[in-house]
Image (cartoon, coloured by chain):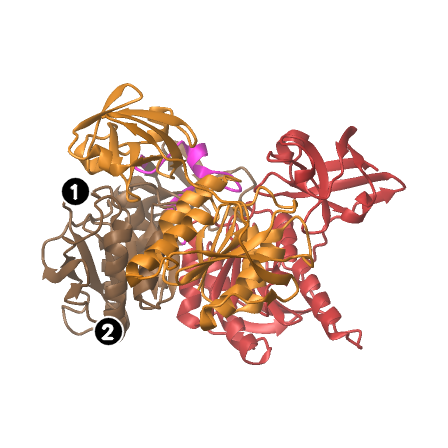
Chain colours: A red, B orange, C brown
Amino acid sequence: MITLSSDFGSPYPAAMKGVALQRTDARLVDVSHEFPRQDVRAAAFWLREILPYFPPATHLVVVDPGVGTDRAAIAIEAGDHVLVGPDNGVLLPAARELASAADDAEAATSAEANAIRVHEIGYENAESSTFHGRDVFAPAAAAVHESWDADRTVPDAVDGLGDVTPTDEFVDLELPEPAIEGDAVRGEVLVVDDFGNAITNVPGYVLDGLDEVRVDGRAVPAVETFAEVPEGQWLATVGSHGNVELDVNRGRGDEAFGLEAGDSVRLKL
Amino acid sequence: MITLSSDFGSPYPAAMKGVALQRTDARLVDVSHEFPRQDVRAAAFWLREILPYFPPATHLVVVDPGVGTDRAAIAIEAGDHVLVGPDNGVLLPAARELASAADDAEAATSAEANAIRVHEIGYENAESSTFHGRDVFAPAAAAVHESWDADRTVPDAVDGLGDVTPTDEFVDLELPEPAIEGDAVRGEVLVVDDFGNAITNVPGYVLDGLDEVRVDGRAVPAVETFAEVPEGQWLATVGSHGNVELDVNRGRGDEAFGLEAGDSVRLKL
Amino acid sequence: MITLSSDFGSPYPAAMKGVALQRTDARLVDVSHEFPRQDVRAAAFWLREILPYFPPATHLVVVDPGVGTDRAAIAIEAGDHVLVGPDNGVLLPAARELASAADDAEAATSAEANAIRVHEIGYENAESSTFHGRDVFAPAAAAVHESWDADRTVPDAVDGLGDVTPTDEFVDLELPEPAIEGDAVRGEVLVVDDFGNAITNVPGYVLDGLDEVRVDGRAVPAVETFAEVPEGQWLATVGSHGNVELDVNRGRGDEAFGLEAGDSVRLKL
């Protein structure tokens, strides 16, 4: 199975699928091609939240503001999964989560169990410098999938692209941590979803036992489900990802709270 | 085969797919994840129009304004199909249509032939109360599919969720009927499609033999195909679903007629 | 494998998939259902650019402003591929490209090698006149796929529709050619992609060796990759399709240049 994620919209993902299907019979599953354009951090967040729900797979990710520069292409082994994409950090939070989940599952006894292993994929023979999704990452993902699916290895080379070599150098990315001091929390909106939920980096436990929280100075009910407040009412809740999110029952939280991805937000518990 | 329908946009449906693929190798086919947000009636209409074109399948539907309340999760047997979703009526018009089509096909001799059978799916062990699509309906659909595909039965329980029990209590939903008195029809716009066609609940036969119809007082050509009128011309026609729809050739009927889903509309034949 | 392309948005493509899956177990791959509405030329361009990346397949295409008129339904043999859609030219540029690629690949010795073969698909028994995607093209594509996949033939008839007969009469479409005289080029914007890149019909070689080009009188850097200019900077580059495109690094070229599909554009090299 190969999952596909990008910020391409339509129809460019189809070219990636065609290229992959020239090289593999794998099942293809779209995660999203509507990730916020060139927003590496937002994609990293979504991938970390969604990929762990998949069975072992190859995850092809192309959110790549650096296309055409000499940023590397990489593959990352993470538990039973392998990720393929640009070396800009977008794969890292998901890779760590996948490796760590494997670790938990196996009650690992070695310190290396949840390690990730990064490989650089050479692409000096790529056809174009403007559409690496089609000309680098799709053929790489197909080759990695064939090898991974057969025996959980990453291939030594990708036909028509170049060699694949282990590396310790890669661009890391950690999603920002909130500052929690007593009852004061300073967090950040990581993404706004299609429902208008403003999803923060603040862990859900801060709302434990609270009926109300102040958000940027305004008192807002802290609830378990949207349905606890009337339609149109602002609320803070713990989303399916375990973080605090700010929303409006049957409305858009981002608009009501005046928040977008990257904005900081103060909570008073 | 499992079809997936929701009002989730992107990327939440991918989490549902991952969960399902942990549990089944079934083919997954998206019906739509762009149903009008939390509009149970619009989704019910589209499902009734589209699902009967599929071969026998499990249909997973999540349009669920009541997520987080104690509304039940249900599975409905309907002919060779089975539907899984929230107990808010969204499944009912499609279930009846599927059961009735099976009835027609089999020239049934028993009164029960086109009956639907409803089962409640317990989910007291669900992981979250905010994302039932991922944590309740996707695992339920996978379990139902495995059982249905094997021998046309619904399972007694879903691993990790709870028991599945037959029930006679469920939320019903019937799409509104038009009032037809002589040449005066009072109907309603059920949905507006992506082309801007305002699709009403008025059966197409009312246009039989007519060249013109008055829509909210305005004379409009009644035609068989858009191409019969010039570009930009308003028209009434019988859509692929068999209902009267109001449109503009190469334009948007909803904007021209000033109609949206839920609006009433008067036709004078 | 059947690929699906249309301007239908959502959820109408699902009805086509259901119909196809009643008749075949083929893998279904969406190319796009977001092609610009009723823009035959834009779809023809995208299909020509994308379909050659696929392995041998049946390509179902429904961009069909003439639905409901008596325009024919056709199937075109092109190399190892076959295309099914309306007889309005939308299939032709892709068909020629696929036939020509097959020719190249086989180092053909006969003049017929890259010929396309067109067949008319009768549909006098179609269920509706308003949704040919569902009632004509989907069943036709499924039948053509089954036959093509088995032995690279087109069937003599489609069950429930009508006969399939070879024809020499079909609507042709050639994408417009630019006028290149010395250092003056008059081209045209063929499509604008989701990133806002204005993709012209001007072949990329005209930029060879240039650092700058005048676009409608304005000096613009000619670069190999977006990353060569600062964010927000206008640029001309050669896109992945080999044509000149006009864009803004991390911005929208169509808005900056004031261009949309169909607009003419003057380049001074």
Mark 1, other Cα within 10 Å: few <14 / some 14–19 / many ≥20 = few
How far is the residue under mark 2 from the one under mark 1? 41 Å
Q: Is residue A263 above or below residue C43?
A: above
Instruction: Say whether residue C61 is left or right of residue A170.
Output: left
Specify whether residue C256 is painted magenta.
yes
Kindly identify which residue carries mark 2: C107
Seen from this angle, which residue lies furthest bottom?
A: A151
Residue drawn at (24%, 73%) of the image: C107
What is the quadrant of the N terminus of chain B in the image? bottom left
Q: Tell me what residue is drawn at x 30 percent, y 31 percent.
A: B246
Indicate the quadrant containing the C terminus of chain B: top left, top right, bottom left or bottom right. top left
Q: Residue furthest left?
A: C168
Q: Is residue A68 visible?
A: no
Labels 2, 1: front one: 1
Residue A185 relative to residue A92: left or right: right
| Chain holding disc 1 | C
Q: Are marks 2 and 1 on the same chain?
A: yes
The quadrant in which residue C27 appears is bottom left
Indicate the amino acid at tag 1: Thr
Magenta highlight range: C238-265
The amino acid type, in three-letter code, at marker 2 is: Ala
Label at residue C259: none
Seen in the picture, residue B125 relative to B243 is either above or below; the reply is below
Q: Closer to the camera, A156 or C47? A: C47
Which of the chains bears the disc numbered 2? C
Disc 2 crowd rating (10 Å Cα; few below 14, some 14-19, many 20+) is few
Residue toward you, C107 or B248: B248
In the displayed structure, does residue A201 sit left or right of residue B178? Answer: right
Asked whether C3 or C170 is in front, the reply is C3
Instruction: Name the residue that disc number 1 marks.
Output: C69
